[in-house]
Amino acid sequence: MSNTDIRDALANAIAYLKAHPDDARYTDSAATAVLESGLAVTVHGPQGMSIHTDMPKSVGGTDQSPSPGWLLRAAQASCLATLIAMRAAQQGLEPGRIEVVVDSESDDRGILGIDDSVPAGPMSSRARVRIGGNGASPEQMAALVRWADAHCPVQDAVRRAVPCTVETDN
C-alpha cells in the first residue's frame, strides 16, 4: 500500500470511530496454543494463521522455532515500525527504511522458579530505531518515534500492568 493509501485508510478509520465511538472497543482475536511435543507449541489464530514456538535446548526444547519471549520482542519491534510508518503516512512524510531492534534483559531464575523474588518475564526492554528519512528533519523523525512509542499497543502492554486472568477448564 502506498503512503497515500495508508493515510486515506487511517483518515477513514478515525472519522468512522469519531462518529461511532462505541465501535472502538472490541475483543481481540484469540490465539490458541497447542503443545505439539516436548516444548514445541503451535499457535492458531484467525483466518488459518499459525506460528510455532519452541524453547532453547538448555531448558529441554529443540531450539527449532522462536521462543515466546523472542516473539514478544518481535511484536514490540514490528508494532513500533508499523506505528512509525502509519504516523509518517498521516503527516505526508516518506521515512524510507525503518528498522527497529528490540532487546530485553531477563534473569532465568524467574522462569525456572529458582527465586520467586525474580520476575519470570523481562526486567527491562529497549528499542533502538533507525529511520532513513527522505527530506524529513531529525526533529520530525524523532517526533514520529515518540508518537509511535506512545501509541503502540504492544509497547503499552509491556510498559503498563495489564490485568490478566488465567482460567482452567477441565
Image: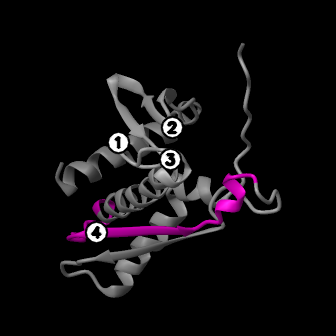
Determine whether the residue tagged by mark 1 lies in a helix, strand or loop.
Answer: helix
Q: How far apart are labels 1 and 2 at the CA level?
A: 43 Å
Q: Which residue is mark 1?
A: 12
Q: Is residue 128 left or right of residue 117?
A: left
155 or 133, which is in the foreground? 155
**Which numbered disc covers residue 39?**
2
- Return the disc, 4 or 3, that comes first in the chain's sequence: 3
Q: Residue 23, how many percent across, how many down?
A: 53, 30
Residue 60 point in image, percent of width and height = 53, 45
Q: Is residue 95 magenta?
A: yes
Which of the two discs, 3 and 2, labels the residue nearer the N terminus?
2
Q: Is residue 25 above or below residue 116?
A: above
Q: Nearer the viewer, mark 4 or mark 3?
A: 3
Mark 1 vs mark 2, foreground winner is 2
Magenta-highlighted residues:
89-113
Q: Crowdedness of circle 4 by 10 Å Cα count: few (<14), some, many (20+)?
A: some
Q: Which residue is mark 3?
A: 68
Please state which of the two labelled residues, at mark 1 or mark 4, is closer to the viewer. 4
Q: Callout 3: few (<14), some (14-19), or many (20+) C-alpha neighbours within 10 Å?
A: some
Query: How dense is the environment of label 1, judged by Cα within 10 Å: few (below 14), some, or many (20 and up)?
Result: few
Query: Which corner quadrant holds the C terminus?
Result: top right
- Upstream in the sequence, badge 1 or badge 2? 1
Q: CA distance from mark 3 to mark 2?
A: 11 Å
Residue type at numbered disc 4:
Ile
For numbered disc 2, what is the local secondary structure? loop
The label number, if any, that marks residue 98 in the structure image:
4
Which amino acid type is marked by label 1? Asn
Q: In the structure shown, which secondary structural element does the residue marked by tag 3 occupy?
A: helix
Residue drawn at x 76%, y 57% is 114
